[in-house]
Image: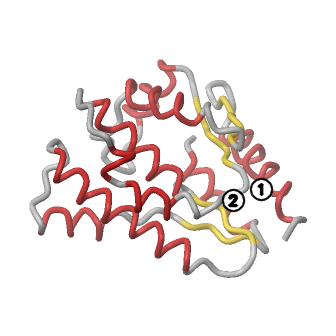
Amino acid sequence: MGKTTALKAIEKKLESTNVSYEIIRPIVERREEQQLNIFEQEGFVQNQKLFIEGELVRYATLPDGLTVFDRGPEDTECFSITFPKLIGQDWDIELLLSNELNRLRECVVESILYLTARDEVLLERKEADESRRRFSFNLEHFRLFESWYKKNPKVRFLDVSSLSEEDVENSVMEWIREFETDV
């Protein structure tokens, strides 16, 4: 069980907590309309500007109270910085997107729960997931993203390799409840 599945399973139980799911389809459609090639520097930079602007709008329009992101601003930052490395490019993303990244980093999250699993478990779950296409899932990418998150002191890791769906739901719920009393 992954983060989206866990959140959807417990969302109705979250009385005073909002859940914000990443909605990327409109941004991908804009990328396609603009014929941006994310494997070229200019196309990637323009693509990330679209995604960062989407995150800024989403963050600015959050309802009052506690919100749990399925994927949040930090995911957009992580992808912006790490993707060029994954495709063998040495683009200076910190410079090319400096204004956008600075604005994105103002979208502060209090805590991040990062669900992880052993390699064989991730691959098995990817193959078994018939709910959506997983073309973009790549184990090397997952581990690079995970190493980026390990540098963030706000991140707590939950290894779900041997947890049942109920255990994952309970663990995520317990983590959320830590913050419900602060609101």
Residue at position x 62%, y 56% in the image: 7
Query: Is label 1 or label 2 in front?
Result: 1
Residue 91's x, y, as percent?
Answer: 26, 38
Quick one: 153 or 65, which is closer to the camera? 153
Q: Are marks 1 and 2 in contact (CB under 8 Å)?
A: yes
Tag shown at residue 93: none
Residue 80 visible in this rendered orientation of the protein = no
Q: Earlier in the sequence, mark 1 or mark 2?
A: 2
The count of marks equals: 2
Which corner quadrant of the image does residue 20 belong to? bottom right
Q: Nearer the viewer, residue 112 or 41?
A: 41
Q: Indicate left or right for 167 with 141 as reference.
A: right
Identify the image quadrant of residue 144: top left
Report the residue marked by disc 2: 10
Q: Which residue is mark 1?
A: 176
Residue name at image x 29 percent, y 70 percent: 26
Circle 1 sits in a helix, a strand or a loop, which is it?
A: helix
